[in-house]
Image (tube, grey):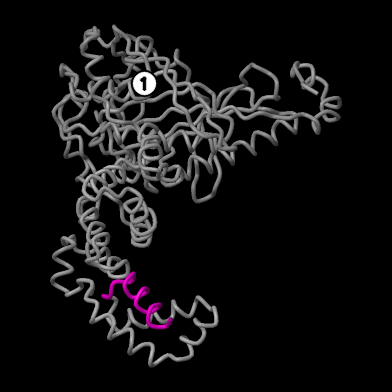
């Protein structure tokens, strides 16, 4: 049964209580994603854009701290990166756009307003395709991507609050979706894909630990089958994918219980996520556009974009993750799950491309990256950007395997050495004397010694127990310190046993 007139039901609680068990609720989620761009300077002044771990209030100037009479000048690189990001997200670039003042009075907002974009933003009407909970492709509409500057940072102490303006003026992109997501998983998948695309385009490092990517998640519930939107809760400043999902899951359950009790939310709210308690907490009634008293920024004139320039930017876009994934599958025959993992990381994708160009062996490169490298990185809690070797080094090592100069077992030792110190694979092999033995006489001698010392395994193999051969090969490899050519060892052992 579809309940269409909620007011009638809430006016008659007893009737509602009879129906609530058969009412199915639908989750409605929209995201605002704030992405810090990786320009050298701030959005409207020449201060360094990197304030991470700097002494408080040392990376500031009269412009970003709002001194009277100081005029903002738009960062051209920030505009370019913003436009590239919007194009990568399939948005239309507005031919004319402007900046606006968005007023709010918080201690960490030195100007008393934020320079943002309101009714004429840089771009509009885009989309991004993601996987839903059933792994089906789903299109999420993007309402707009606009540019703005950031506020400072408050640190709350037991006897007051400390204000650091170093972040004030940091260049941000705000990516605003339509309320198209229906679960916390969809929201997390969308946010993760945004991070991948921003890194691929080169507009942001999206380092969560440094606050370079934050989420405001709006969520409401409604009876399934209805089209109207009910009052929402906006959860502010979520700084990890895990917190995004946990906060939404908690709020979904919280609002579901309110509906079931006949007391759904009646006005928009702003909430915070209390991570150590695992719950949201209402902060205030949510502000609407009128509360911010927007008006055009008088110190920055409107922009008129050249269509030819936009087309040049569009042509300069790198291959995006979806395109790379299809290429890895179609051209190289990589399994879909591996192609997805590689293409989702711009650093891993670059490493893969370099190694394949060198070795011309995409499947081996994929196996080493997915099976070995990601395991080491996860074990050591390291990131790909911290690697000491290059893709061409991995490609060179794979060439040495394919040429029979090192065995797969030795290659693992070589790879770990590359990973630890960044040495070239040939240098490691020569320095440690790891070159594979392919001399027939030397391998035959080792095989004869192993056969004489293991008559039971020889008999087992003759009786059809194939595992016995593996034991014999292992003994030969042990005797030669893993240097013997495994293929030759197999062939020689079988020949001598028969």
Image quarter of residue 439: bottom left
The quarter of the image holding the C terminus is bottom left
Residue, disc 1: 145
| Residue 497 counted in the magenta span | yes
Against 32, residue 272 (above or below) is below
For this orientation, the residue located farthest to the front is: 498
Q: Nearer the viewer, residue 122 or 417?
A: 417
Image position, residue 416 (x, y; %): 27, 65
- What crowding class fits label 1: few (fewer than 14 Cα within 10 Å), some (14-19), or many (20 or more)? many
Against 327, residue 279 (above or below) is below
| Residue 279 counted in the magenta span | no
Image quarter of residue 184: top right
Give left or right: position of 156 versus 387: right
Q: Which residues are magenta?
A: 483-498
Against 193, residue 448 (above or below) is below
- Residue drawn at the location 69% of the way across and 33% of the way down: 258
Give left or right: position of 55 versus 369: left
Image position, residue 391 (x, y; %): 23, 50
Q: Nearer the viewer, residue 341 or 202?
A: 341
Image position, residue 253 (x, y; %): 64, 39
Q: Nearer the viewer, residue 393 or 362?
A: 362
The quarter of the image holding the N terminus is top right
Instruction: For residue 303, say whether it is visible.
Output: no
- Residue drawn at the location 23% of the way across and 37% of the way down: 166
Mark 1 element type: strand
Would you say the magenta stretch is mainly helix, strand or loop? helix
Against 299, residue 232 (above or below) is below
Q: So how many labels did they put on this image?
A: 1
Instruction: For residue 80, say whether it is visible.
Output: yes
Q: Nearer the viewer, residue 222 or 149?
A: 222
Image position, residue 5 (x, y; %): 76, 16
Image quarter of residue 375: bottom left
């Amino acid at each position: 049964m579809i309940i269409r007139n909620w007011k009638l039901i809430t006016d008659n609680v007893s009737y509602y209580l009879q129906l609530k068990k058969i009412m199915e609720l639908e989750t409605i989620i929209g995201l605002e994603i704030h992405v810090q761009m990786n320009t050298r300077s701030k959005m409207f002044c020449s201060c360094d854009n990197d304030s991470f771990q700097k002494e408080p209030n040392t990376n500031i100037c009269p412009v970003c701290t709002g001194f009277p009479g100081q005029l903002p000048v738009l960062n051209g690189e920030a505009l370019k990166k913003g436009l590239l990001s919007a194009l990568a997200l399939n948005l239309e670039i507005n031919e004319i756009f402007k900046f606006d003042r968005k007023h709010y009075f918080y201690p960490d907002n030195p100007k008393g307003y934020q320079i943002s974009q309101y009714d004429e933003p840089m771009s509009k009407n885009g989309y991004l395709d993601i996987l839903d909970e059933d792994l089906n492709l789903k299109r999420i509409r993007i309402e707009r991507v606009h540019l703005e500057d950031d506020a400072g940072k408050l640190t709350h102490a037991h006897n007051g609050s400390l204000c650091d303006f170093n972040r004030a003026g940091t260049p941000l992109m705000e990516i605003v979706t339509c309320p198209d997501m229906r679960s916390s998983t969809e929201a997390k998948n969308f946010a993760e894909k945004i991070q991948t695309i921003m890194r691929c385009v080169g507009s942001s490092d999206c380092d969560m630990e440094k606050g370079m990517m934050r989420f405001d998640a709006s969520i409401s519930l409604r009876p399934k089958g209805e089209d109207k939107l009910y009052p929402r809760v906006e959860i502010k400043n979520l700084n990890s994918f895990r917190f995004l999902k946990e906060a939404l899951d908690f709020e979904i359950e919280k609002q579901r219980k309110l509906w079931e009790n006949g007391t759904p939310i009646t006005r928009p709210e702003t909430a915070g996520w209390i991570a150590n308690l695992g719950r949201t907490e209402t902060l205030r009634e949510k502000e609407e556009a009128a509360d911010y008293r927007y008006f055009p920024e008088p110190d920055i004139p409107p922009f008129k974009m050249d269509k030819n320039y936009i087309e040049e930017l569009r042509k300069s876009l790198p291959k995006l993750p979806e395109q790379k994934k299809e290429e890895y599958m179609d051209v190289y025959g990589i399994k879909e799950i591996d192609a997805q993992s590689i293409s989702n990381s711009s650093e891993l994708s670059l490493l893969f491309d370099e190694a394949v160009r060198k070795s011309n062996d995409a499947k081996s490169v994929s196996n080493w990256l997915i099976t070995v490298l990601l395991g080491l990185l996860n074990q050591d809690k390291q990131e790909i950007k911290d690697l000491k070797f290059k893709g061409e080094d991995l490609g060179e090592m794979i060439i040495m395997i394919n040429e029979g100069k090192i065995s797969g077992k030795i290659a693992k030792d070589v790879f770990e050495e590359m990973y630890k110190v960044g040495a070239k694979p040939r240098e490691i092999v020569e320095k440690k004397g790891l070159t594979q033995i392919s001399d027939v006489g030397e391998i035959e001698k080792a095989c004869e010694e192993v056969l004489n010392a293991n008559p039971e395994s020889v008999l087992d193999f003759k009786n059809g127990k194939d595992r016995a051969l593996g034991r014999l090969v292992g003994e030969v490899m042990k005797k030669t310190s893993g240097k013997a050519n495994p293929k030759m060892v197999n062939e020689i052992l079988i020949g001598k046993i028969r």
